[in-house]
Amino acid sequence: MRMVKWGVGIFLVAFLGACGSSQRASQQKLALVNIVPEAKMALSMDTLKDTVLLPADTLKISAVTRIDSIDEPVVLTPEEKRLQERLSGINKTADWAPAIHYDNRKPNFVIIHHTAQNSVAQTVRTFQLPHTKVSAHYVIGKNGQVIQMLNEFDRAWHAGKSKWGTITDINSVSIGIELDNNGKEPFAEPQIEALLVLLDTLKTKYNIPQTNFIGHSDIAPTRKDDPSSFFPWKKLAERGFGIWYNEDFLPQPPANFNPTDALKIIGYDMTNPEAAIRAFKRRFVQTEVNSILTPRDIAILYDLYRKYY
Ligand SMILES: [Zn+2]
């Protein structure tokens, strides 16, 4: 047992050392920083079980010495923390028989945000500050500049406490896109055009359903109001991203139509019905955002429900 633990420890230290030095050597090559640890991480998972079975005399003495000499708490880089987390995905109480057919889990939702900040530079800085604990995969500027900040396969911290249907960990299944916008202004045309191109790429690449392009306020209606009612959801829906209703003809809902059930079926968390209705109106009514469903709002809801669900 002692040998097994040493094996894992030595393996981790040797690997983490390599990660740190490769990052320092290529500060300019940000894209590579993500790729190199991924490759090594895959190697580590494949070789972990082999490593722990190595006889003690094949282990390098220098690595053992290094473990013994550590007396300060080690500050891990994000890549190192990520590796530790991946290793925790191996269940020690189960036997191990490695499968050979697998790949990355893929995003199946896109969550749209506005930054509520004043510039792309400010948003990028916010996501790079250690204490903020927030991030997104993409930030799009008013001029249409698209900045990627995280590999699409990585889990960004953009959704926070949120719920959509029965999904309670939105970060694990989604791509987060932040639009540079202070929340009180229309969205710039070049920005929306750039967003549409990006959404097209993501939809095709990951086969994301049309209904799964949603807003932050949809999934966290009590906490969030982004994107604001200026956001052109209709334009997005016309291109196949998110849903919209027939503005020219809204059929009368049947007498037994239940708006609360329909909102729930669409995905809204109805724990706080007033907040969910506000989120619904922010997205689909836009000219009026409150917690009262008018007959027209109910007709909009019914049209969405019968068209998509
Ligand atoms: Zn947001």
Image (spheres, rainbow, N blue to C red):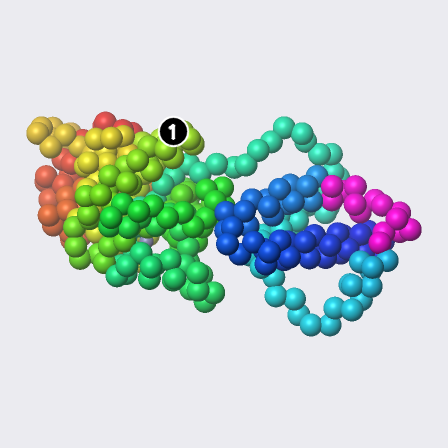
Q: Is residue 219 visible?
A: no
Give the left or right position of residue 64, taking residue 241 as reference: right
Tell me which amino acid carries mark 1: Thr
Task: Give the residue furthest to the left.
Answer: 248
Q: Residue at x 78, y 69 (%)?
A: 69
- The quarter of the picture where residue 241 lies is top left
Give the left or right position of residue 294, taking residue 174 as reference: left
Residue 306 in magenta?
no
Q: Residue at x 72, y 57 (%)?
A: 13
Q: Is residue 123 visible?
A: yes
State the extent of the magenta-drawn residues as a range: 47-60
Residue 49 in magenta?
yes
Q: Residue at x 54, y 47 (%)?
A: 32
Q: Where 56 sits versus 214, above or below?
A: below
- Mark 1 lies on residue: 204
Q: Residue at x 37, y 48 (%)?
A: 147
Q: Where 47 sits versus 217, above or below?
A: above
- The quarter of the picture where residue 44 lies is top right
Where does residue 212 sit, x and y in percent of width and height?
Answer: 34, 36
Where does residue 308 sit, x and y in percent of width and height?
Answer: 27, 29
Where does residue 278 sit, x and y in percent of width and height?
Answer: 21, 51
Where does residue 184 sit, x and y in percent of width and height?
Answer: 17, 57
Closer to the camera in the image, 299 or 210: 210
